[in-house]
Image (spheres, rainbow, N blue to C red):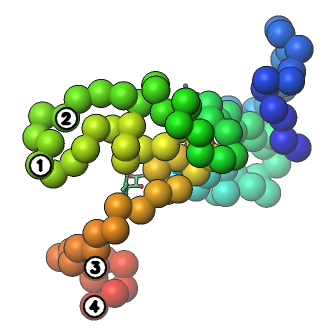
Amino acid sequence: MKYDTTTLEHGSTIQCDVCIVGSGAAGVTLAGELDGSGLITLVIEAGGAKYLARQQTALQGEVANDSSHTTPDMYRRRMLGGATSIWGGRSQSSPHFADFGVA
Ligand SMILES: Cc1cc2nc3c(=O)[nH]c(=O)nc-3n(C[C@H](O)[C@H](O)[C@H](O)COP(=O)(O)OP(=O)(O)OC[C@H]3O[C@@H](n4cnc5c(N)ncnc54)[C@H](O)[C@@H]3O)c2cc1C
């Protein structure tokens, strides 16, 4: 079941066994692992299903070295999926690929 908290009555209570805050990679992975466990799992997401610039204000900040990254509101997302909803366009090799079965 999906709720839009902007339409819930103030003071409403939603019962659950596990409450996961944030629907980014961590939250959704955890929810997926709990699926079928019998536990009533609630995922709370601060943003909406679509990107809205006004939702990004909570992510504003400064970076110590702006040559490698822009400010956090530019590369994180306050929306369903969190930071997985954007891609920076960079691919890097990793010495740890073998850990995932990729030579
Ligand atoms: C441009 C870019 C490229 C990337 N490329 C890669 C890559 O190639 N490979 C890789 O492995 N990783 C990559 N990453 C990193 C990866 O996307 C992040 O590490 C991962 O998405 C982090 O997941 P998370 O769930 O911890 O946090 P987030 O994705 O930040 O999710 C947090 C969620 O919680 C919500 N939230 C925050 N506070 C609250 C609150 N109080 N109440 C309710 N909801 C809240 C937010 O709105 C957000 O949806 C990249 C990241 C970026 C930004």
| Secondary structure state at the residue bearing disc 2 | loop
* Label 2 with label 1: CB-CB less than 8 Å: no
Name the N-terminal-most of marks 4 and 3. 3
Residue 21 can be seen in this image: no
Give the spatial CA distance, label 2 vs label 1: 9 Å
The residue depicted at 59 percent of the width and 39 percent of the height is 52
User: Foreground: 31 or 79?
Assistant: 79
- Look at the image and tell me whether residue 40 can be seen: yes
Residue labelled with disc 4: 103
Identify the amino acid type marked 3: Phe
Amino acid at circle 1: Ser
Residue 97's disc number: 3
Give the alpha-carbon distance from disc 1 to disc 3, as whole Å: 26 Å
Q: Quadrant of residue 101?
A: bottom left
Label 4 or label 1, whichever comes before in sequence order: 1
> Are dots 4 and 3 in contact, CB under 8 Å?
yes
> Residue 102: percent from the left, percent from the top?
34, 87
Query: Which numbered tag is attached to residue 67?
Result: 1
Label 1 crowd bin: few (<14), some (14–19), many (20+), radius 10 Å: few
Position of residue 58 in the picture relative to residue 10 (left or right): left
- Which sits earlier in the primary sequence, circle 4 or circle 2? 2
Marks 4 and 2, how far apart in space? 34 Å
The amino acid on which the numbered mark 2 sits, given as a three-letter code, is: Val
Residue at (34, 68) in percent of width and height: 89
Q: Is residue 28 above or below residue 44?
A: below
- Mark 4 and 2 residues: CB-CB less than 8 Å, in contact? no
Q: Is mark 4 within 8 Å of ligand 1?
A: no
Image position, residue 16 (x, y; %): 79, 31
Viewer-proximal residue among 45 and 40: 45
